[in-house]
Image (tube, coloured by chain):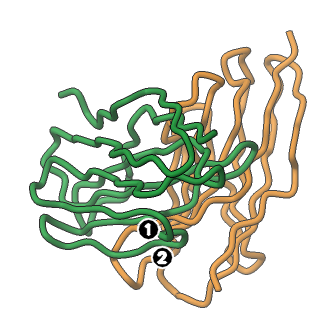
Chain colours: A green, B orange
Amino acid sequence: NAGVTQTPKFRILKIGQSMTLQCTQDMNHNYMYWYRQDPGMGLKLIYYSVGAGITDKGEVPNGYNVSRSTTEDFPLRLELAAPSQTSVYFCASRLGQNYNEQFFGPGTRLTVL
Amino acid sequence: AQKITQTQPGMFVQEKEAVTLDCTYDTSDPSYGLFWYKQPSSGEMIFLIYQGSYDQQNATEGRYSLNFQKARKSANLVISASQLGDSAMYFCAMRDGSSNTGKLIFGQGTTLQVKP
């Protein structure tokens, strides 16, 4: 199993540009999450999904959108990039309600200039 | 509101010695879970240990143990016999058990440096 994969690893955007961060897991996990980590800080939840077709907002959803059309994929969309969205983005997945561990992807480092 | 607090921005420890990283939490839910993650300089998040709020015994995983004091709302990580490879950022996190969504709330982290 590849686990949780994220693309791209690095990206530089100009203010106002859009992009999609890709996240895929091959563990048949129902639950998926997007977090962001600002420099020197802990992770904050952006969006999460408890299954295909179901998504909900986390702590810091403004400026982002998600979709979950399949169990495997959970892309994160930035529509109008702003410097405040400069961060490292982590995708994570969890098998189900009765399982504790969240498996994290390697992260995407995004800079908005 | 739920909150995780890590009051030690940075810690030093001598190789082969034990070190305790502090974590306090705040929640009104009776069911919750507490996690510790390690983030080395390469950036990935590595799961270390988990403690459920109803677990009677402190969790242990190899050289890692979680000192869970429910009344004090603390969940300190103890690393025994520190190794140079333990140098990293460590995050304490809490899962809200009542909602079953598995959402994690993270502390700000503690940077641990192991001296040879």
Find disc 1 in the rendering and name its residue. Answer: B103
Residue at left offset 68%, top offset 41%: B90
Residue at left offset 40%, top offset 57%: A79
Chain hosting mark 1: B
Q: Nearer the viewer, mark 2 or mark 1?
A: 1
Locate residue A4 relative to residue A112 in the image: left or right.
left
Residue at left offset 22%, top offset 55%: A95
Chain hosting mark 2: B
For the N terminus of chain B, the image quarter is bottom right
Dot 2 surroundings within 10 Å: few (below 14), some, or many (20 or more)? Answer: many
Image: B71 above or below B15? below
Residue A11, image x and y in percent? 48, 30
Residue A25, image x and y in percent? 21, 41
Type of residue at label 1? Answer: Lys
The secondary element bearing badge 1 is classed as loop
Residue sitting farthest toward the left: A70
Q: Nearer the viewer, residue B6 or A70?
A: A70
Image: A59 above or below A38? below
Image: A68 above or below B60? below
Dot 1 surroundings within 10 Å: few (below 14), some, or many (20 or more)? Answer: many
For the C terminus of chain B, the image quarter is top right
Residue B75, image x and y in percent? 69, 61
Find disc 2 in the rendering and name its residue. Answer: B96
If you read the primary sequence from the N terminus, does the residue marked by circle 2 or circle 1 appear first? 2
Pointers 2 and 1 in contact (C-beta within 8 Å): yes
Type of residue at label 2? Answer: Asp
Q: Quadrant of residue B70?
A: bottom right
The secondary element bearing badge 2 is classed as strand
* Distance Cα–Cα, label 2 vs label 1: 7 Å
- Are callouts 2 and 1 both on one chain? yes
Locate residue A51 relative to residue A109 in the image: left or right.
left
